[in-house]
Image (cartoon, rainbow, N blue to C red):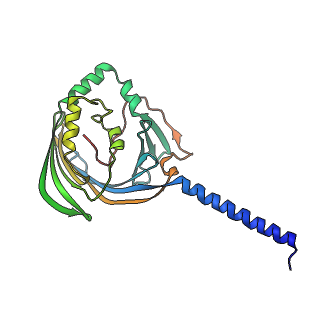
Amino acid sequence: MKHPVLRSARFVSLGLTALLASALCSSIALAEEDGVFIETVNRSSGLTGEAPTEEVSQTFVAHGKMKVASADPNGTDMILDPATGEMTFMNHGVKEFYKINAKSMMEGLSKPGMDQMRAMMEQTKVTVEPTDETREINGWNCRKYRVAKTGMMEIEQEIWATEDVDLDLDRYTDLMSLSGPDGLLGDSEAGRAQRAEMEKIKGYPILTKSKMQLMGTNMESETEVRVIRREPMAASLFEVPADYKEREMNMPGAPSAHGAPAGHP
């Protein structure tokens, strides 16, 4: 029979171990949040001298942030934080990152430059035509919409959207959109008209086919959502790795978020 003191010490030790394990599990739980995972296939063709491309991107949404990650381990990922207006770009190939604040970038543009860009964007006319054509795409019931954008460039789109998915990512996509509520057009008549037209598209875009002319070249692109699911996501997923080096950006611009979920024009 064990000595009472030793037995008590063993119980205390087991109790502390259980307490520490419970605390560890609690900290892990606090660091995770139920988020949204989206897998998208991005196809493009028409670029002079280049073969058609196909790229898979993954989007993670949780903890008030959105991350768009390339399937290429040496590619570039982007993190959007609408609360601060910050966009972070991580280049995994060279382990570097840089940050751009969308709000500060807008404020940093010269007034003549902003006025000129605003005038060009105000000329953009968006027309959305809902159709009665429906089909199932990747398990979702979708309706077809025809979209035409004229002005700065001519763009024709075929958008298949589903109402089977309750997903609103406008707060993230608006950060990348100059015509969003906080963009160059803001609450202007042109901005409201463009957004009102796009709101005719009911539900979340699953398949988007786009045709455009750029400098005499016809370009085509296609974005297809293959997976949408909810899953736990750690807060660290939306942080820059500690061994990445920050790079300064001196230009008021940023790479396009290829594969990011579609938003307003």
Quadrant of res 148: top left
- Residue 251 in view in this figure: no
In the figure, 137 relative to 86: above or below? below
In the figure, 2 relative to 243: above or below? below
Q: Quadrant of the C terminus?
A: top left
Quadrant of res 196: top left
Q: How many marks?
A: 0
Is residue 239 rendered to the left or right of residue 42? Answer: right
In percent of width and height, residue 80 lies at 41, 42
In the figure, 102 relative to 6: above or below? above
- Residue 59 in view in this figure: yes
Residue for point 20% across, 31% down: 190
In percent of width and height, residue 43 lies at 26, 53
Q: Quadrant of the N terminus?
A: bottom right
Q: Nearer the viewer, residue 215 or 172?
A: 172
Residue for point 17% across, 62% down: 135
Is residue 129 rendered to the left or right of residue 165? Answer: left
Residue for point 49% across, 42% down: 96
In percent of width and height, residue 72 lies at 40, 54
Check the image and name the residue furthest to the bottom: 1
